[in-house]
Image: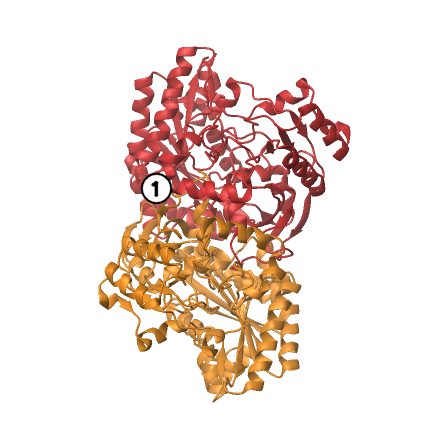
Chain colours: A orange, B red
Amino acid sequence: MATAIASIASRLRAILPADRVLDGPAALIPYAFDASFWSLRARRMPDVVVLPETTDEVAAIVRLAAQTGTPIVARGAGTGQAGGAVAARGGIVIAFAHMRRILAIDRTDLQCVTEPGIVYADLNATLAGHGLFFPPDPGSGRACTVGGMVANNASGPHAVKWGTTSAYVLGAEVVLADGTVIVTGGARSKALKSSSGIDLTKLFVGSEGTLGILTKLRLRVQPRPPARAVVLAAYDVLEDTVRALDDLFAAGILPATAELLDRSAVDALMKWRPDLDLPQGEAVLFIEIEGTKTSVSASVREVEAIVQRRATTTRLAEDEAAIQRLWAARGGLAAATALLFPGKHRIFAGEDLAVPISEIPRTVRRAREIGEETGVTVLFYGHFGDGNVHSGIVIDPEDPDEVRRADELADRLHRLAIEVGGTVTGEHGTGAVRAAYMRAEHGPALDVMRRVKRALDPQGLLNPGKLDLDPGKLDLEVPEG
Amino acid sequence: MATAIASIASRLRAILPADRVLDGPAALIPYAFDASFWSLRARRMPDVVVLPETTDEVAAIVRLAAQTGTPIVARGAGTGQAGGAVAARGGIVIAFAHMRRILAIDRTDLQCVTEPGIVYADLNATLAGHGLFFPPDPGSGRACTVGGMVANNASGPHAVKWGTTSAYVLGAEVVLADGTVIVTGGARSKALKSSSGIDLTKLFVGSEGTLGILTKLRLRVQPRPPARAVVLAAYDVLEDTVRALDDLFAAGILPATAELLDRSAVDALMKWRPDLDLPQGEAVLFIEIEGTKTSVSASVREVEAIVQRRATTTRLAEDEAAIQRLWAARGGLAAATALLFPGKHRIFAGEDLAVPISEIPRTVRRAREIGEETGVTVLFYGHFGDGNVHSGIVIDPEDPDEVRRADELADRLHRLAIEVGGTVTGEHGTGAVRAAYMRAEHGPALDVMRRVKRALDPQGLLNPGKLDLDPGKLDLEVPEG
């Protein structure tokens, strides 16, 4: 680094008020982690954290970083599970906690403009007042920021129908590696679609802060469906869930969600809350239908009639309280896990496979076997309707042997995903944790990613050590225990 | 150019059978044009046209072009309206007429793999047999290729609900400027979603052959809705169409289409086919609802009740024959125009504005005034639900003064789109015709597009003269008459 950190902090205080430049060790600690197990195992401290309030401040910070050769990492709420927002090589973390304004909401034009630091649930609460919603619904939606969602191309259960964050980003204000500010998707555009020029917006979506820093987001939003209903269906064998989903497709129906609970997850939930009275079977599906009240009422009965054919039991929930009870069961997995395995913790590692829908049964069966072979407890669930299989690894993180076996399990799960024609991450991002799999998954396309990276960040200062874009310098050494 | 064209043609004949290398002037003529008025006014002949059948052949052709410094232009059906598939600087045109196979269709996994030369309607006819469809429906769907759609991020009436082509491209095999072949979206992936690495797929979508040549496409497809219904609604004033659409949004309803016919288009249609009995008014909307039979039946009545509030007349079509009659009316604009203005032609210029929905009335009113000020006949219609306003300019292309006035009209329409917060092209692409507006629309983001271009095509051989990516060499001189 060309300039001492103390000097950089003092120069940052010329850009920002002193209380928005943090460099005391205690103040920095929260920024050394995200939700990944990787980040919990070795503290990776940033040298300075800054809390800008305007794009101009961000640009000035980035210019200083460029002049001094200092790494720079953008950070939302730190809910990521791949180390994406952790400063793998130190330097400056730009935290967006102070840039959380909604700048415009326009129902007629089906869009809004926000700063990146706004929390997903807060945005949707405000949009709801306008009859609108922003569809991608990550599991961490009550905490994660919209900027982080865009940086990771996040999604969740409803991506089956609505797609991922990428489909809803119309444009972005971006601070480039040299501090230049651009607006993608048209400098002053409020158009809902465009075929003009190269689509830079989608290039920045999912690039995890390695190509530029997002400072404003222009998002497509949707009319909020006023009604929904859920069909719960239990199946004797996993393969029947695939057949049931295909039955729906054959009838021309794409549900809003098709959530899968594997037997491992159902068992955990039933021990935690027997009153939920979840049906028994190798797998349970949660199928949600959205629309107007009359259309949902018509559709949900068609759906139930179709999924009944192969199910052992189905249950229909039409009133909002009953629907919320079902979703609470699905959402209770973390609590159930904590209760069932006292002294152990669910860790985030190898947790976000996405495979072809037809390969889900084979993937889950093989993954269970790998869990047994490594002697590690693991639950499976996921967003079945788009092939996203989540694994919940449960270990005692103080037990070095269990940690070693969990490492092996996570590694083998990642390789399994690629082997069955899937990806190591469906919605959580690559970050540092999955960088080592980029060559296996992408082959020579990785070299093109690196060319794009070099073109936009020739000094390699934007979020270094992520996505395998700067090979030979990867900070993935795993300390024991 | 480093090597004489005769020598390149003979070297191409070492790669491909002689009957798939065209260099006789008569054989080349069809490739000198697309549907743009720009291409009809001055013949831009390629030097050679090749018709490859495999990716290896395409790669060998591109390697030869790279070695000899020869421009290379990918071409689908030539239905484009912006000159994108016309060789603005000569060189080799790669025509994909022989690469039109469907390589895989998988309903359970909701995807298919095709070669780029397949015609959109042919793909959908085959998908229909599996209960599937590929949603983007460009107006040229019976002729255009899927490769061209991906290159231009094409769409059509149903993009209101389904989005544009970009949302459906999961991965692509791409031949790079040096002849290297990569696969984006995972080298062997069949995943439906991914957050792995930088999203190169979406970078190639819409880049019009300036960054690489598409040789295979992995596409997300959807269960085909088995039923639909259409509500036709007429309004006294344009502004009420915006209010009616917003009423639907407020009720949580996003229709599949919301097509607009401005009075100019309704008048033309009624003179052509009075039996269509279109309702009178400043504007008519076609609102289509899709789903299962029971859900459509429920929804369409809700929609009619809502749009009736502000409409002068509404009409409901539920049986397929009646629906097709209505769409035939919408599709009859070209025929109506030809009949009403004998000796004149509808030209494609300034034809693809997309503006914020709320700005459509102001845009159409101002556009009508510009038509009057320039003394040029122009009709307006479009995909109202996403702000896409098409203009149909009708002139005698042999009349130099009328051509000059049409040029002025098209130029002013493009500037108007940018001025009201829109884009010069919603779905047709930039090509050569709209390259001159890239700086005004994108500002400094254009420089980032150029950096990406240089990183992927340092010699500037891929579709030169398009998207303003190689400034100072643009072939936009307009010959008189």
Horizontal side of residue B417 vs A387, given as left or right: left
* Rendering coords of residue B324 (x, y %): 52, 35
> To which quarter of the image does residue A324 belong?
bottom left
* Rendering coords of residue B23 (x, y %): 69, 23
B180 shown above or below B476: below
Q: Residue lying at the far bottom in this picture: please name it.
A: A342
Check disc 1 and report the residue beneath it: A189
Q: Is residue A273 visible?
A: no
A289 shown above or below A199: below
Mark 1: secondary structure: loop
Q: Nearer the viewer, residue A232 or B429?
A: B429
- Quarter of the picture holding the N terminus of chain A: bottom left
Horizontal side of residue A125 vs A317, given as left or right: left
B52 shown above or below B103: above
> To which quarter of the image does residue B261 belong?
top left
All told, the count of numbered labels is: 1
* Rendering coords of residue B407 (x, y %): 40, 20
- Name the residue: 62% across, 36% down: B119
10 Å crowding of disc 1: few (<14), some (14-19), many (20+): many
Q: Amino acid at mark 1?
A: Ser
Q: Nearer the viewer, residue A27 or B110?
A: A27
* Rendering coords of residue A436 (x, y %): 57, 65
Q: Write down the chain letter for disc 1.
A: A
Q: Nearer the viewer, residue B94 or A258?
A: B94
Q: Is residue B361 visible?
A: yes
- Name the residue: 43% across, 19% down: B394
